[in-house]
């Protein structure tokens, strides 16, 4: 178990897409292109309104329900090649996040709804992979994706820490609900290119205790949340 001076250390768990890497718009474009090739029309903006934070399987189920048509089986295997091509050309780390990770001095992890190969590629492409080691967790590893708490609870078990010692950074309602259901403190991040003016309030309503507008303000926010978690663990 992670300890410092005989006390539990807070673990910071980051969502990947829209938090560590500015990928939500790219991923939506890729999915919409694949869906269009299968005869299903939906815009990236519409897709992001109801699918940010969900696993690909859950997104496709939501698309089928929204359009009233089944999604062909050819769509799922085509998603990663299309997404990878856009990521290779355009994906970047969220501005300032590398500096935060270098300065944080706390154990860190990734818990993402994306498939493992997409998470690995994103972190490598953005130059962030070295910060997390083996502490990279995908919804493919659990029975239920966000907004269920399974993924965050799995990350805590794998890192051998109680859920109450974890602080989560999320940009999605589904992820915020999942982390709160796991008993974790949540900070909402609204610095991605996909964020709209109402996202901060929606994250607060879902259970985020504070909002990080961009990573230039991220380090003090994380340190404050870590101190509050430490106090909670001492009670």
Image (tube, helix red, strand yellow):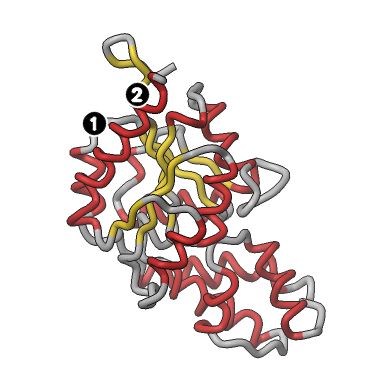
Residue 216 position, x and y percent, is: 18, 56
Find residue 9 and name its label.
Answer: 2
Of 98 and 74, which appears nearest the observer? 98
Q: Position of residue 188 (x, y in %)?
A: 39, 56
**Residue 21 higher or lower than 182, as above or below:** below
Dot 1: few (<14), some (14–19), or many (≥20) neighbours within 10 Å? few
Please state which of residues 172 and 36 is positioned toward the viewer in this rendering: 172
Name the image quarter holding residue 157.
top right
Q: Secondary structure at mark 2?
A: loop
Q: Secondary structure at mark 1?
A: loop
In depth, the one of 102 and 133 nearer the eye is: 102
Quarter containing the N terminus: top left
Please state the total of marks drawn on the protein image.
2
Between discs 2 and 1, the one toward the N terminus = 2
Outermost front residue: 235
Residue under the point 40% across and 62% down? 18
Which of labels 2 and 1 is toward the front? 2
Which residue is located at x 61 percent, y 53 percent? 146
How packed mark 2 is, by other alpha carbons closer than 10 Å (few <14, some 14-19, many 20 or more), is many
Tell me the quadrant of the picture where the C terminus can be found. top left
x 38%, y 38%: residue:
12
Camera-side residue of 21 and 86: 21
Which residue shows up at 46% across the image and 71% down it?
85
**Picture coordinates of residue 145, whole percent (x, y):** 65, 51
Q: Is residue 25 above or below residue 175?
A: below
Per the model, the C-alpha gap separating discs 2 and 1 is: 10 Å
**In the rendered image of this protein, does residue 26 appear above or below residue 39?**
above
Kindly indicate the quadrant of the structure image that contains residue 34: bottom right
Q: Which residue is mark 1?
A: 105
């Amino acid at each position: 178990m992670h300890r410092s001076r005989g006390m539990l250390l807070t673990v910071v768990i980051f969502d990947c897409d829209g938090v560590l890497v500015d990928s939500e718009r790219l991923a939506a474009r890729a999915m919409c292109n694949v869906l269009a090739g299968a005869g299903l029309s939906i815009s990236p903006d519409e897709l992001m309104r109801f699918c940010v934070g969900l696993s690909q399987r859950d997104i496709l189920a939501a698309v089928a329900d929204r359009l009233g048509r089944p999604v062909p089986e050819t769509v799922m295997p085509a998603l990663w090649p299309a997404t990878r091509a856009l990521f290779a050309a355009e994906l970047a780390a969220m501005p300032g996040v590398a500096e935060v990770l270098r300065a944080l001095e706390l154990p860190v992890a990734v818990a993402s709804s994306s498939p493992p190969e997409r998470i690995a590629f994103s972190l490598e492409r953005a130059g962030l992979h070295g910060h997390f080691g083996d502490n990279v967790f995908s919804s493919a590893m659990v029975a239920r994706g966000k907004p269920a708490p399974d993924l965050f609870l799995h990350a805590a078990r794998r890192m051998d820490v109680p859920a109450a010692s974890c602080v989560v950074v999320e940009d999605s309602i589904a992820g915020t609900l999942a982390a709160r259901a796991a008993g974790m403190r949540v900070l909402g991040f609204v610095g991605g290119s996909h964020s709209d003016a109402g996202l901060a309030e929606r994250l607060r309503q879902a259970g985020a205790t504070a909002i990080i507008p961009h990573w230039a303000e991220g380090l003090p926010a994380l340190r404050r949340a870590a101190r509050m978690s430490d106090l909670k663990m001492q009670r």
